[in-house]
Structures are given as C-alpha cells and as structure tokens.
Amino acid sequence: MTVTISRRSAVSPFLVMDVMEDARALEAGGRNIVHMEVGQPGTPAPRAATDLLAARMAARDALGYTVALGLPELRKGIARLYRDRHGLDLDPGRVVVTAGSSCAFILAFLALFDAGQRVALADPGYPAYRNILGALDLEVVRVETTLATRYQPTPGLLDGAGAVDGLLVASPANPTGTMLSRADLKGLADWCSTRNASFISDEIYHGLTYETPAVTALEVTDDVIVINSFAKYHSMTGWR
C-alpha cells in the first residue's frame, strides 16, 4: 500500500518545538537548562482555577461534553473581563471558547478565507501563523517591517503588498513585544474596511505590558476577530 502525503503537510517546522525537545533530552541526561525557547510563564495557574478544576474532577458529572461554543458561564465571564478591562459592552454571544488559541486561529482562518486567498502579516512575526496559513492553502503575504514602524504593519506598508483578503496583527507582538496604539489599530481597521479585507487581532499577550495597557481592537471596530488566551497572562499553558 502506498501512502500519499498531502502537500499541505509541506510546511516549515515550528523550530521552537525542536529546540524544546532537544532541551528536554539534555535535561534527561542531567544537564541544567534555562528555558527561553517558549512563552512559558514561570508562575503556576491561579489557585482559584486549580481549586475549581480539582472540585470539578471530583464531581460525578465532571468534565463531560460542553455546548459547542463553550460553557455559557465562561463566555459571560470573558465578556465581563472586557467590560472591566476595556469598558466594552461585549455580548457573550460573540465569545467562542476553543481548545487553545492555535485552534482559534485555525477556525478563524477556515471561517474567513477560501483556499488560495491572501493574508497579510508582519515580518518578523510569530512563525506558526505562516505554518497554519500554509497548511490551509492560504497565501502568506509577509509585510516587511522596520524599526521606524516598530516592527508593526502600517497602511502605507500594506499598500505596497498588493490586494489581500485579510490582515493579521499582534499587539503585544511576538517576538518583538511592540504594541499598536488606539490610533494604529483604527488606521489598520479602516484600511481593511475600505478593501473588504478581514481583520484579525492576536491579543494573547494582553496584560503583560509595562507603563501603557494594551488596546483591544474591539475598542476601535466591531468588524474584527479578536483571539485571546488564558495561557500567558493567567499562566495556564497546556490547559486545553
């Protein structure tokens, strides 16, 4: 029997995971490793979360299937977070809970784009964006940024990228750590709106900022998909 491998699997490896595995092997051999390869918080999950999980696991009806969009009480809690943090009146019906932010990116890309469409993102940027887009037969449009734009895309840079069907931004960004101001986000949202391009905002590093709080794209437009996560700020990586 000949096994056919999908051409969609021909994506570049996510090198950070290779480095992580090499580090694990060295640790198993007795080496003392300082891990700087992944965005792994050095603190444990909040005590309230671990206590609640322990209680739910001990219950007879623990951890069954949930409704498709996530536990209603959790979705309401996330909406309250955006009210308390950003002053937004967010309808919990707009909140979808996924098994990690990577799953959210996959679902967002599948919902917004057809195979062959073009999605712009900043370069340098998080490499897994490109891997997921490529695996879904979407064309990655790498927008080369500079220190002058704080390694973030601008409408001017995007004008030189040709027609695109979507734009993905991250603030705070990985790996640069730079943020988009309210005016920056408004300019990018308007640029997408006038070109019928979908706008996606990665906000998983919200809360991990100095001096100036991060602005959510929801403060400047409703025509955006915002992806956030419990992993970083709440120290809950792996809680999928």
Image (cartoon, helix red, strand yellow):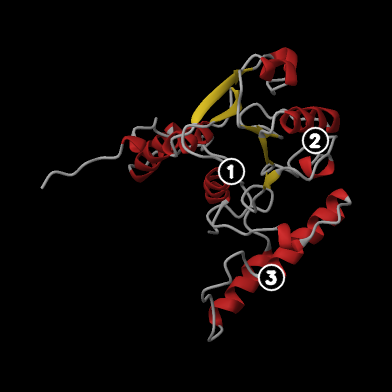
Above or below: residue 17 compared with residue 78: above
- Residue 28 shown left or right of residue 207 in the figure: left
| Foreground pick, 173 / 169 | 169
| Foreground pick, 105 / 172 | 105
- Residue 115 shown left or right of residue 46 in the figure: left
Q: Give coordinates of residue 223: x percent, y percent.
A: 75, 43
Residue with the mark numbered 3: 72
The three-letter code of the residue at mark 1 reads Leu
Q: Give coordinates of residue 68: x percent, y percent.
A: 57, 66
Determine which quarter of the picture holds residue 15.
Answer: top left
Determine which quarter of the picture holds residue 226.
Answer: top right
- Residue 222 shown left or right of residue 234 in the figure: right
At 51% from the left and 39% from the top, the residue drawn is 114
The three-letter code of the residue at mark 3 reads Pro
User: Among all residues in the image, which is located at the extreme bottom?
Assistant: 60
Which one is in front in this view, the residue at disc 3 or the one at disc 2?
3
Q: Are marks 1 and 2 in contact (CB under 8 Å)?
A: no
Q: Earlier in the sequence, mark 3 or mark 1?
A: 3
- Crowding at label 2, few (<14), some or many (≥20) Cα neighbours within 10 Å? few
Determine which quarter of the picture holds residue 134.
Answer: top left
Q: Earlier in the sequence, mark 3 or mark 2?
A: 3
Above or below: residue 220 compared with residue 75: above
The three-letter code of the residue at mark 2 reads Tyr
At 32% from the left and 35% from the top, the residue drawn is 7
Under circle 1, the secondary element is helix
At 66% from the left and 44% from the top, the residue drawn is 204
Which one is in front in this view, the residue at disc 1 or the one at disc 2?
1
| Foreground pick, 141 / 127 | 141
Residue with the mark numbered 1: 112
| Foreground pick, 40 / 65 | 65
User: Which circle marks residue 210 in the picture?
Assistant: 2
How far apart marks 3 and 2 lie (CA) works out to 32 Å
